[in-house]
Amino acid sequence: MERICVVVCGVLLLMSTASVGWEQKHDYKLALSKSLLFFEGQRSGKLPPNQRLTWRKDSALRDGQEGGVDLTGGYYDAGDNVKYSFPMAFTATMLAWSIIEFGDGMAEGGEWINAAETLRWNTDFLLKATANLPNTVYAMVGNPNSDHNCWERPEDMDTPRPVYAVNTTHPGSEVAGEIAAALAAASIAFKNYDAAYSWRLLSKAKEAYYFANKYQGSYNDAIGHAVCPFYCDFSGYQDELAWAGAWLNKATNTKKYQKHVDAAIRKIKFMEEVTQNYYIDTEFSWDNKHAGLYVLLSQIGQYKKEAQTFACGVLPESPTRTIKYTPGGLLFKTEGCNSQVVGSLSLLALIYAKHVRLARERITCGNTKFPAWKLVEFAKNQADYILGTNPMGMSYMVGFGPKFPQRIHHRAASLPSINAHPSFIACGNGFSYLDNPNPNLNELTGAIVGGPNTGTDHFDDDRRQAAQTEPTTYVNAPFVGVFAYFINHKK
């Protein structure tokens, strides 16, 4: 991807969407279905017979050969043709958590199997990325610089496909830790569906965590020339170590990893004191696991104060709110790919609300107490905004509603498909499609784009504006859980 979803804060005023007259109802079953369909458009490797987005074809069938390993499959992260294990693993964790918490909504919407297949396409790749443990984890396939110098269909790719790995002497605790978390979470999601696969995932999760924890270090130092500035780890790797340990505790139903979790969190809190970065409890993204970590741990009665800080930080009426909103009511934290923050924090709000309600508790923010349904209301407002309840009257999901982005920043969607243009389109010959003002030739159904990035609810439907129009797997993944929740819940 060309622009990174790094979290920053704006300073804006909130207006309730209820006061400005664009209320409408949305079909959450349809939104869930389309949000999962998007992932089929991001598939790399040999496509299965039941592929539904048929304008996509097989691609990158030799991935991994340069490293002597099979790294075919998985997902392209965004509108380019590179595969990054770090954000791909976070995508898997979000899909798995969505299935764990809101699989009932997926079943009611007739999408549980599609959700499981979406997750499995990801975890199958992560198993390949960890095939050479205990000494090596594969962090990336493809050269992002040469890839970004082309505007090329994945089916035509002729750019270099180098393999980048972390190992015992050049470690990458964040990528190995996130893979461990993803595999552990997925093992729970698959436990009652495919017990043998679940056991395999959990076994590999333990190996990946051992590697991440024993050989501590950032992949910024090991392979930073490849991943930076695209997916640099800005928040450090202690959050991934704590996150992975917490998921392994949950997957094994033990406290075996608790001392490692606590040790990592102590280091995180020490750095908060040093940097005075106390708003960090509302951070949750492929790079930063803090809020997600505390919400996960709060389910077993740990770090409840920090989880409540997250809730109070996002609730619009909270006296201790730290999140900013656009005038139209959209959570706004970053100039690039803001929808990632919207989706991830909305999913967390629903998960935390579910467990606060089960515990028959309330959320205390300063001198004000809130019921759990206020977090549900927050998440619903965000989901509805993405689906079209906004000042632009535009859905930010491709193919949903009467008005949606037509010019998304995505190579495969903008170039003619193999069906329409079977002959090879060379690296540099595709830029005419990037610069063409016409709508994309292929509909990447279900893709959620970066959305408004100015804090003023304005959106430019221009594929050259990557921060607004580029979709990513880790934007869609948490929305899968959000839409699933609202299929059978109102509050």
Image: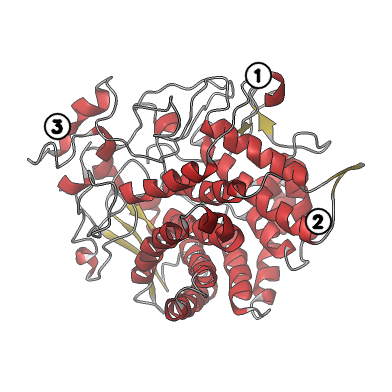
Identify the image quadrant of residue 385.
top right
Indicate the position of residue 455 as horizontal and vertical percent values: 59, 24
Q: Residue drawn at (44%, 47%), measured in percent from left and top?
A: 33
| Tag 3–tag 2 contact (CB < 8 Å) | no
Q: Secondary structure at mark 3?
A: helix
Q: CA distance from mark 3 to mark 1?
A: 46 Å
Which quadrant is home to the N terminus? top left
Q: Secondary structure at mark 1?
A: loop
Numbered badge on residue 429: 3
Decide: is 317 above or below 106: above
Mark 3: amino acid: Asn
State how the image is colored. Answer: secondary structure
Q: Earlier in the sequence, mark 3 or mark 2?
A: 2
Closer mark to the observer between disc 1 and disc 2: 1
Q: In this image, 423 relative to 123: left or right? A: left
- In this orientation, does residue 389 appear? yes
Identify the image quadrant of residue 300.
bottom right
Q: Which residue is mark 1?
A: 21
